[in-house]
Image (tube, coloured by chain):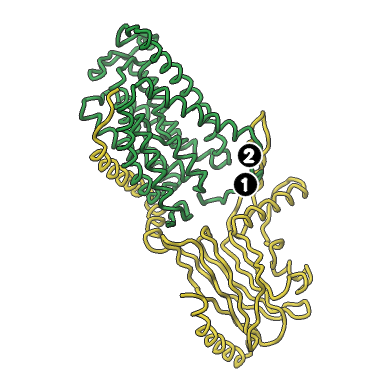
Chain colours: A yellow, B green
Amino acid sequence: MTLRALLPALAAALLALAAHGVARAEPLVLGLSDELIQVDQRFTGTQLLVFGAAEQPGDIVIVVRGPEAPIAVWHKARVLGIWINHDSMMFASVPRFYAVASTRPLEAVAPAAVLREARIGIENLGFWTVSVQSEERIAEFRHALIALETAARHYDRVTEPVAFMAQRLFRVSLSLPATVPIGDYSVEAYLLSDGKIVARAAKPLRVRQVGFGAAVFAFAHEYPLAYGFLAIAVALMAGWLGGFVFRKQARR
Amino acid sequence: MDIYLPIAELPLNVFVLLGLGLAVGFLAGMFGVGGGFLLTPILIFIGVPPAVAVGSGANQLVATSLSGLFAHFRRGHVDFKMGGVMMAGGLGGSFLGVWAFKQLREIGQIDLVISLSFVAFLLVVGGLMGAESVHAILRRRTGRVRRKAHQHTWVHGLPFKMRFRTSKLYVSAFAPLTIGFLTGVFASVMGVGAGFIMIPAMIYILGMTTAVVIGTSLLQILVVAGVATVLHAVNNQTVDVLLVVLLSAGAVFGAELGTRVGLKLRAEHLRALLALIVLVVAGRLIFTLALPPERLYSLTVIGAP
């Protein structure tokens, strides 16, 4: 379904949402085009449409937070003439995906302290380390981690601004890459006015492998021994078929 | 057309994978080796996490070696007893190799060890084979005939001798056991069948005839790769069976093509060619190790491939 085809239906959903929200005096409501991203064998990335309605004027910031995991960052250095992983730092609670979009640039929307507290913005991701290295080194590794994940399109500072349509309805389209991490995400919307957060809303988003791929993944992790034997069986069958075809072997 | 690989967790082009399998199968058919030495680095290059490349490479090796084994078996070129002893050693080697792989992965040095192992391995083998094949070509040119099938080395003085009928040998069991053990370690750490080490070792150290060497080595590779696959699947969950299916589909056709081309060449010319390929790959690896890397920093997610 193209986004364009989706829009009339969305507009209707939005109005209903907004009406509902206004009736119950909810200052901010949020909706997603998909609450479950299905990664099947044909997956090469997808678009996620985030939309909603705000009761009062202000700026909207949308944050998509992916599942958290510990990540080790490695630094290569030249040792005895060859380049090897020489130094490392481990970070805990690192979001494996992070996207942020807003109606105006973040610096214009709220002061740094407010953004930091709400963990809005790629500089404020909130992962930490217990490393005993210098502040400078820690900052270098942090920077490297952010640069690597940004290059992998796992961290995204969305350039397209959150757009306001009629009736305080807003929308923004986010792009999820082919290597989007599987797991539980949270999509958050913040309404800011005068540099303060006046309302927030959140919706869960699930990214899951489905179909054949999911079955394979689950099987590999839950029954690793059986999976190993199955993998061999598959290879043996392929080889046997090959032996059939591959009849003439050189005499050496 | 892209397909999403469930264990590697990324989409890859189907035709690229089929083509890669074809190339690897071609090498197997032509030279009688696993082709894994090419497969693993290329898989890593196109974005497959190294651990998945090695685990899936070992799996694909099972398919390729079985395919070649059939042809040799029909001609009686397989010494099952010798293979059995080597396999006993190979089993121990596989366990050690997979355990070592896991430890190295945890301290983040797996890329380095894989690269260094590859370089050392390829240099030694390329050098040895190159020397041997050039010698054989020259010998043929000057018309000097080979003296006899077996030459007795210091190895033949070791205890625990056993009779190996198919290879027509009476030699200590320690020799094939050790060769098998080293093969197991290599297969598990690098995802390569180490046919390169086995074949010269069997010819020069054990004194087996070349025909039986290739068949028996394929048998050894098959079992060791199979064990390595299971161990990788259980310890690391890094075997992507969908990746293997696609590679094998290409490899089956490649092997057929490779055999036909290989038959048209003289044995010593073939060995010289293979030695050249191996040395070129080793050279390229050294180059990449010595030059400053494209990215100084890298990351690994704990608990994911």
Lateral position of residue B77 relative to residue B201, left or right: left
The answer for which chain carries disc 2 is A
Figure quadrant of the N terminus of chain B: bottom left
Q: Is residue A225 positioned above or below B67 on the image?
A: below
Residue B43 x/y as whole percent: 47, 44
Query: Which residue: 64% across, 73% down?
Result: A62
Q: Nearer the viewer, residue A222 or B305?
A: B305
Q: Which residue is mark 1?
A: B298
Distance from disc 2 to disc 1, alpha carbons, whole Å, reads 9 Å
User: How many marks can you see?
Assistant: 2
Q: Tag 1, which secondary structure?
A: strand
Q: Is residue B150 positioned above or below B2 on the image?
A: above
Q: Which residue is mark 2?
A: A85
Q: Is residue B36 positioned above or below A216 on the image?
A: above
Residue type at mark 1 is Ser
Q: Quadrant of residue B147?
A: top left
Residue A223 x/y as whole percent: 37, 52
Lateral position of residue B70 relative to residue B272, left or right: left
Lateral position of residue B206 relative to residue A206, left or right: left
Residue A60 x/y as whole percent: 68, 77
Lateral position of residue B270 relative to residue A65, left or right: left
Q: Is residue B302 positioned above or below B251 on the image?
A: below
Q: Quadrant of residue A78?
A: top right
Residue B154 x/y as whole percent: 40, 9
Do discs 2 and 1 belong to a common subunit? no
